[in-house]
Image (cartoon, rainbow, N blue to C red):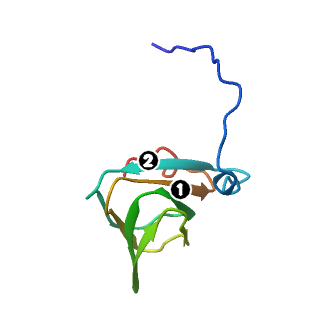
Amino acid sequence: MTQIIAGTKTDFAIDPDILALLPTQGCIELQHDAAGKVHAFHTHPVDEILVVIKGRLTFRWEGGERVCTAGDKILLPAGTLHESEALDDAIYAIAMSPITTTTCGRDG
């Protein structure tokens, strides 16, 4: 059943660096991965920017690998083969544009 719950919070603060990633048309997804979660090698049809908010990720792409920590930004052009592994409890934002049925709200 659909419900609408009246809000009591009138201010919603978003880190300015994350808000700056919000495209004119598109979305930002927040991803939460427990330690050991692996997103096996895959590609996306759109450009993405990932910002690590908490924790550490090993990020691998064709020709490279790096441990990314809070504050790191990953610029990921469309079609780039990549994978990630959470080294500990990790939260990161993913900005993508344009919006398609395979981007926002995908299960990964």
Picture residue at 55% right of the left edge, 64% below the top: 71
Mark toward the start of the polypeptide (1 vs 2): 1
Instruction: Report whether residue 71 is seen.
Output: yes
Dot 2, crowdedness within 10 Å: few (<14), some or many (≥20)?
few
Dot 1, crowdedness within 10 Å: few (<14), some or many (≥20)?
many
Q: Amino acid at mark 1?
A: Ile
Query: Whole-percent x and y of residue 103?
Result: 51, 52
Picture residue at 25% right of the left edge, 59% below the top: 36
Question: What distance separates the C-alpha of mark 1 from that of mark 2?
Answer: 11 Å
Picture residue at 38% right of the left edge, 65% below the top: 57
Secondary structure of the residue carrying numbered label 2: loop
Q: Quadrant of the N terminus?
A: top left
Q: In which image quadrant can residue 46 be found?
A: bottom right
The residue tagged 1 is: 94
Q: Amino acid at mark 2?
A: Arg
Residue 104, label in figure = none
Secondary structure of the residue carrying numbered label 1: strand
Residue 106, label in figure = 2
Identify which residue, 80 or 90, lies in the foreground. 90
Identify which residue, 4 or 8, lies in the foreground. 8
Instruction: Report whether residue 46 is seen.
Output: no
Query: Whole-percent x and y of residue 85?
Result: 32, 64
In the displayed structure, does residue 8 sit left or right of residue 3? right
